[in-house]
Image (spheres, rainbow, N blue to C red):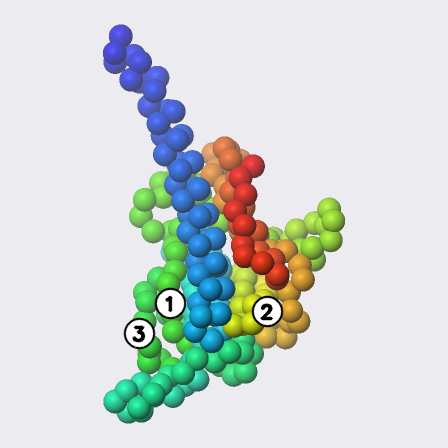
């Protein structure tokens, strides 16, 4: 009898574990975006969140957060440096390091060309997300109008200035998303990261949505 009850309970335990994992990743994404906004205001440096599928074959999702710097050498070559840069768009090569770093491998201040620092990241492709869960972070953006269709995109580049102004770009590559962000005006639309588990390609369970707007902190919704 005990064995039968245990066998019946196992699927519920697995389902609960998988749902908690999906929620935890959504919460980590939200917190990293909030961290970018608070760090921008506190350090006087623009911060860029780059969202995409990540490395490897699973392409489940990844977010990396970068801080803008002025390219000055770090001590002992320079007394003070590198220094924060408040603009998302001042230097055409400002965010090149976002295209070069390995997934979630924080680099120290002074790495590469001193124009950006990888602060932190979250990689859904890391071990612990099982194939039977098939968790994926889908990126979408829209113009913010009522009942507007949200377009699915491959990459999002979300940059926040110390004044709280948000610029968002999207594209089929990280480079194109950043380039699109550099030519965009202040963001007035809506972007989202939608976390869903799948079975046989069909979404199952609750969907966790991290909502990104231009005028406030990202919000986490479940539905």
Whole-percent x and y of residue 94? 48, 79
Whole-percent x and y of residue 12? 38, 24
User: Which residue occupies 54% across, 75% down?
Assistant: 88
User: Which residue occupies 32% across, 71% down?
Assistant: 107
Label 2 vs 1, first from the N-terminus: 1
Q: Along the horizontal axis of the image, is 52 left or right of 15? A: right
- The residue pinned by badge 2 equals 165
User: Which residue occupies 34% across, 20% down?
Assistant: 9
Whole-percent x and y of residue 113? 38, 83
Q: Secondary structure at mark 3?
A: loop
**How many discs appear?**
3
Whole-number angstrom distance, CA of label 3 to CA of label 2: 26 Å
Label 3 vs 1, first from the N-terminus: 3
Q: Along the horizontal axis of the image, is 121 left or right of 223? A: left
- The residue pinned by badge 1 equals 119
Quadrant occupied by the N terminus? top left
Label 3 vs 2, first from the N-terminus: 3
Camera-nearest residue between 202 and 44: 44
Q: Which residue lies most toward the front here?
A: 42
- The residue pinned by badge 3 equals 108
Whole-percent x and y of residue 93? 49, 81
Quadrant occupied by the C terminus? top right
Residue 173 appears anywhere in the view: no
Task: Check disc 1: other Cα within 10 Å, few if <14, some if 14-19, many if 20+.
Answer: many
């Amino acid at each position: 009898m005990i064995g039968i009850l245990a066998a019946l309970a196992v699927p519920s335990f697995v389902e609960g574990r998988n749902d908690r994992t999906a929620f935890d990743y959504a919460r980590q994404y939200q917190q990293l975006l909030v961290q970018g906004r608070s760090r921008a205001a506190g350090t006087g440096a623009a911060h860029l969140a780059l969202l995409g599928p990540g490395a490897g074959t699973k392409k489940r999702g990844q977010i990396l957060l970068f801080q803008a710097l002025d390219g000055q050498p770090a001590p002992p070559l320079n007394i003070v440096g590198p220094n924060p840069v408040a603009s998302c768009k001042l230097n055409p090569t400002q965010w090149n390091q976002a295209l070069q770093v390995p997934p979630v491998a924080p680099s120290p201040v002074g790495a590469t060309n001193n124009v950006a620092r990888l602060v932190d990241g979250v990689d859904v492709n890391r071990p612990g997300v099982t194939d039977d869960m098939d968790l994926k972070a889908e990126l979408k953006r829209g113009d913010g109008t009522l009942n507007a269709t949200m377009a699915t995109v491959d990459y999002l580049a979300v940059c926040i200035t110390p004044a709280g102004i948000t610029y968002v770009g999207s594209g089929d590559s990280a480079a194109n998303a950043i380039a699109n962000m550099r030519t965009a005006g202040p963001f007035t639309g809506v972007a989202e990261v939608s976390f869903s588990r799948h079975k046989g390609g069909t979404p199952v369970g609750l969907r966790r949505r991290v909502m990104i707007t231009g005028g406030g902190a990202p919000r986490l919704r479940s539905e």
